[in-house]
Amino acid sequence: SSRQTRGTRHSKSLRWFDTPKVRFAKMPRTSYLFQTDLGDPVSCVFVNDFGCLAGSMLGKVMYYSFRDGEAETLAAFSDEGVRGLYVDAEMSYATLMDVCKGWHSEAPYQSSLSVNFRTWDRKNAQNVKHILQRGPWVLVLFPMSTTVMHVARQEHQHRSFKLFDYGTSTEVAPCDFDGEKLVLVDRSRGTGPPLFRIVHLERNHHTEVDNVPAADSVTLLKLWGASYLICAQHRNLLIYDYEDQAPGVKLIIRGQGSEIMAVDS
């Protein structure tokens, strides 16, 4: 299985989540992989059976090969931070704000790929607004257009969804993408709790969610499975079924420690 987390932060201690149904224990084993530079924190991490990739806010990309047991710096600096990562048997990929870069996954780890998203449509002078990634699938959101790209196959498809149709960048923000669906938080209604929108990009089908308990306290929002939202609310996790919104809430995992800083699903 693969794991990718954005905005991770080291904590001083590991805590328990303990409920009658769910119990998470301490990780039994940890390994030192990378050292980051002062003032350049890690922006995202990806790990699977091939290795572990870490990207930084200043564009540094580091790769640890599980087969070779060695760490290598693939890129030392960029004008943009790393937004997403993926690795397979042949290549390692890093997605920045308007470009995807790739390196061979074997020494000497030569650079062999660079795709600029703005060259897909030379008549389109828009700048990229948001980048979201899950595994090999990258979602590129322009204000008036949307494109989905598979980094390993180097294939991309345009979608009819337009972010600008739902409000300004101060009102509507994308939170997560699972390869098929996008979830947005929409504050265009002004006062009151936000509205969450789930968009199936290929069908351009929209589902509105406006009854999540304490929605204004949600700090992280993730898509999970076919029909679930994972909502972090301070130190608690709420699992919500947006296809069955009555009652919607399936489980609440109550934490006992600090605020949740990152969620993977």
Image (tube, helix red, strand yellow):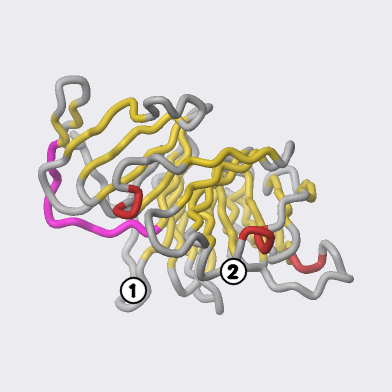
Membership of 79 in magenta stretch: no
| Kind of residue sitting beneath label 2 | Thr
Marks 2 and 1 in Cβ contact (< 8 Å): no
Q: Position of residue 54 (x, y in %)?
A: 43, 57
For residue 22, above or below residue 234: above
Please rate how many residues cluster around mark 1, counting C-alpha atoms within 10 Å: few if below 14, some from 14 to 19, many from 20.
Answer: few
Q: Is residue 13 magenta?
A: yes
Residue type (three-letter) at the residue carrying disc 1: Asp
For the magenta stretch, what is the residue range? 7-16
| Residue 11 percent across, percent down from the top left | 19, 56
- Give the answer, above or below, for where 19 lies relative to 109: above
Residue 67 seen in the current view: no
Residue where numbered disc 2 is placed? 168
On the image, numbered disc 1 is attached to which residue?
Answer: 37
Residue beneath the point at 39% across and 42% down:
264
- SS for dot 2: loop
> Between disc 2 and disc 1, whose residue precedes?
1
Image-quadrant location for residue 35: bottom left
Of marks 2 and 1, the one in the foreground: 2
**How far is disc 2 from disc 1 in space, using C-alphas?**
35 Å
